[in-house]
Image (cartoon, rainbow, N blue to C red):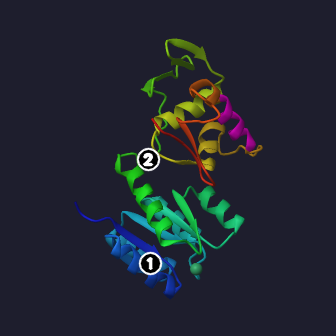
Amino acid sequence: MTEARILVVEDEESYRDSLQFLLEREGFAVDLAASGTAGLDAFTRDGADLILLDLMLPGMSGPEVFKAVRERSDVPIIMVTAKDDQVDKIIGLELGADDYVTKPYSGRELVARIRGVLRRYAGGQRDIVDEPERLTIAGLTLDPERLQLTRGGETQSLPPKEFALLHLLAQNAGRVLPRQVIIDRVWGSDYFGDTKTLDVHIKRIRSRVETDPSEPSLIQTVRGVGYSFEA
Ligand code: CA
């Protein structure tokens, strides 16, 4: 098995050095880029299995690099944001970053997140699947034509948004879907309503599919990121 190649785009030398040390010690191959432009060049030239992208870069900014990479590839990207900067977090998630870490991060946490993202991508689920197809997973059958859920021999009809949300999560089982991605897919990208709407719908579908909705096992909350369906 070849080691995963990680491209680190980071303008601060001390972070670059420590990341290289940490990631190589963990068995990753590491490419370093000190600016957004250099990072994009390196990715275009050599590719990567995952990009660790600092949001605050001089010149070409993190979000600009993100968009440029996304135009040509769905490589997983973990966004690195400044400490406790809510705006940065929101930017990262709105762009659709696969995950993010805030500085200062612990090496162990970072490595765990990298492995988590790589694992999620390994199953051939790079693109978010959003096809209106009948689906059976974890004892649930979802019928998009009738907006029906069958569980334990009982069939119920769901309101359209609840069905779309459950179907999207189930179809992308094992993958964390960022909140904004879910909202875009289920409510449309021109939806500017309260994002609490998403949580309300999650609660409703949990009450339909979870054995104990207060201890959900199928629909997991990934704090600060979004939700995942774990079969
Ligand atoms: Ca920086």
Name the kind of residue labelled 2 in the image: Asp
Q: Which mark is residue 19?
A: 1
Q: Residues within 10 Å of mark 1 (few under 14, many from 20)?
A: many
Query: Residue under circle 2?
Result: 127
| Foreground of the two, 183 or 60 | 183
- Tell me which corner region of the image, top left, top right, bottom left or bottom right, holds residue 149: top right
Residue 192 - label: none
Position of 4 with respect to 227 (left or right) is left
Most distant residue in the bottom direction: 13
Q: Residue at x 65, y 40 (%)?
A: 188
In this rendered view, identify the residue nearer to me: 16 or 126: 16
User: Magenta span has 20?
Assistant: no
Picture quadrant of residue 199:
top right
Going by the numbered disc 1, the residue's amino acid type is: Leu
Q: Which residues are magenta?
A: 196-204
Quarter where residue 82 is shown: bottom right
Mark 1 or 2, nearer chain start: 1
In terms of secondary structure, where does tag 1 sit? helix
> What whole-number distance in Å separates the C-alpha atoms at marks 1 and 2?
28 Å
Label 2 packing within 10 angstroms: few (<14), some (14-19), many (20+): few
Rendered view: 141 above or below 33: above
Percent position (x, y) of residue 34? 47, 83
Rendering coords of residue 139 (x, y %): 45, 23
The C terminus sits in image quarter:
top left
Residue at point 60%, 43% (across, down): 182
Q: Residue at x 47, y 46 (%)?
A: 175
Camera-side residue: 10 or 228? 228
Tell me if residue 27 can be seen.
Answer: yes
